[in-house]
Image (cartoon, rainbow, N blue to C red):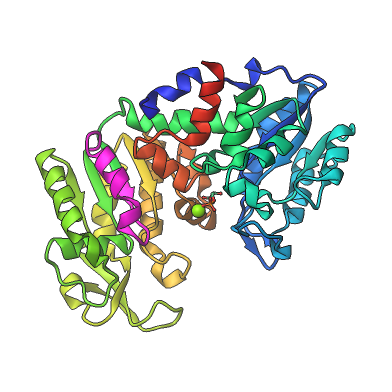
Amino acid sequence: MNAARTNFTLPTLEDLEVEDLRVLVRADLNVPLEDGAIADDLRVRASVPTLEALLERGARLAVCSHLGRPKGKVREELRLAPVASRLAELLQRDVLALDEVVGEEAERACASDADVVLLENLRFEPGEEANDAGFAAALASFAQAYVNDAFGSSHRGHASVVGVPALLPCAAGLLLAREVAELERLLEGPEHPFVAVLGGAKVSDKLGVIRNLLERVDAVVVGGAMAFTLLAAQGHDVGGSRVERGRLDEIRDTLKEAEAKGVDVLLPSDVMAAEGIGEGSPHEVVSLAGIGSRMGVDIGPETAARFGDVIAAARTVLWNGPMGIFEIDDYAAGTKAVALAIAEATSKGAFTVAGGGDSAAALVELGMTDAVSHLSTGGGASLELLEGKELPGVAALRKERS
Ligand code: 3PG
Ligand code: MG
């Protein structure tokens, strides 16, 4: 089925009987950590409305999530304890944080009358990624109903995402439902001009999205390292910049398709060139021809102005991926200019969406999370949805109903 139609049959929280029941909530609490502390709590905050709605209706919760990629083994630095503390602050309630995912302790906690239990990192158990039937059954045994609110994980066919909903009455949480609806708005009847702003390291991650959007967008604006692969495909010399050589033919085909469909593809004409990607390495703004042995680490000011004009005049904007290495101040100007242009479009009534972990991180860093109509908590999940794929976690909920 077409991804654009899934939302019509998504069971919602209201469809689910929850009073006096334990509800297993799959959330995506996979937050960035720095020295054991949460560096950005966007995903924890985004999961709160569903948890509160369920608690208000008299449910007791067993919340579960993965954190990082421990690959089926306990890794002390990936325990969910810091997330439990933040969640308790936000909910203003006790959160009983377990140090196991399944087992006797988890069974006892879920059978108790504790309002909010947080299971340990799902990926400590090999059964999670393997979608093991026994592991899914063990998770399901803790609860009488299941809610998937983990939009950012719904492209994964893991036990907590696709295994459990086959075993319990289930529904989409508020975040999952909103994410799907907002992203589908980009695919279904978007207002024009519709501009897709793409950046980040690798063009290979984004080609599927570009192809699916060519039917719908008026312009594709490309920055970040991926722009150099497109420029190289057009025959430009990009010096020491990163190029995915294996993708050049595919990209030439995609560029031809864009031309045939009348979609403008805007690429950098000037860049910040640096001798290394580290902080403090010598850098200057140059035209493409001037990069030489250096590498491009941000779009230049002339490019930023050109991109900004197109973005600010759009009625619909999708932004995925930074324009340069924005974590380093000297290379953040292009990303900031794009964020400001998107904020301007939003303030003039455009529908604007930022998706992908790095664009969200850039907006958080710039203190500009309000600059977009919708800030997606999904990275890979939002890309797969925009490629036109149905997310396995969403399909698993829909199936339950039909
Ligand atoms: C994400 O951060 O994109 C999601 O939490 C999914 O994590 P994963 O890419 O490790 O599956
Ligand atoms: Mg990821």
Q: Position of residue 291 (x, y in %)?
A: 22, 77
In this view, the residue in front, 168 or 241, is 168
Q: Place residue 54 in its image quadrant.
A: top right
Q: Position of residue 159 (x, y in %)?
A: 61, 40
Query: Which residue is rendered at x = 19% and y = 60% of the image?
Result: 248
The answer to if 129 sits in the magenta stretch is no
Query: Which residue is rendered at x = 26% and y = 31% of the image?
Result: 192
Q: Is residue 274 above or below residue 132?
A: below
Q: Is residue 173 left or right of residue 366?
A: right
Of all residues, the one furthest to the front in this rendering is 134
Query: Which residue is rendered at x = 51% and y = 55% of the image?
Result: 361
The answer to if 201 sits in the magenta stretch is yes
Q: Position of residue 16 (x, y in %)?
A: 67, 18
- Give the magenta-colored segment's residue range: 196-217
- Residue 149 visible? The answer is no
Quadrant of the drawing holding the N terminus: top left
- Residue 331 visible? The answer is yes
Q: Is residue 265 left or right of residue 17?
A: left
Query: Which residue is rendered at x = 61% and y = 51% of the image?
Result: 30
In this view, the residue in front, 290 or 241, is 241
Q: Position of residue 41 (x, y in %)?
A: 64, 50
Q: Place residue 169 in its image quadrant.
A: top right
Q: Is residue 67 above or below residue 182?
A: below
Q: Is residue 151 left or right of residue 27?
A: left
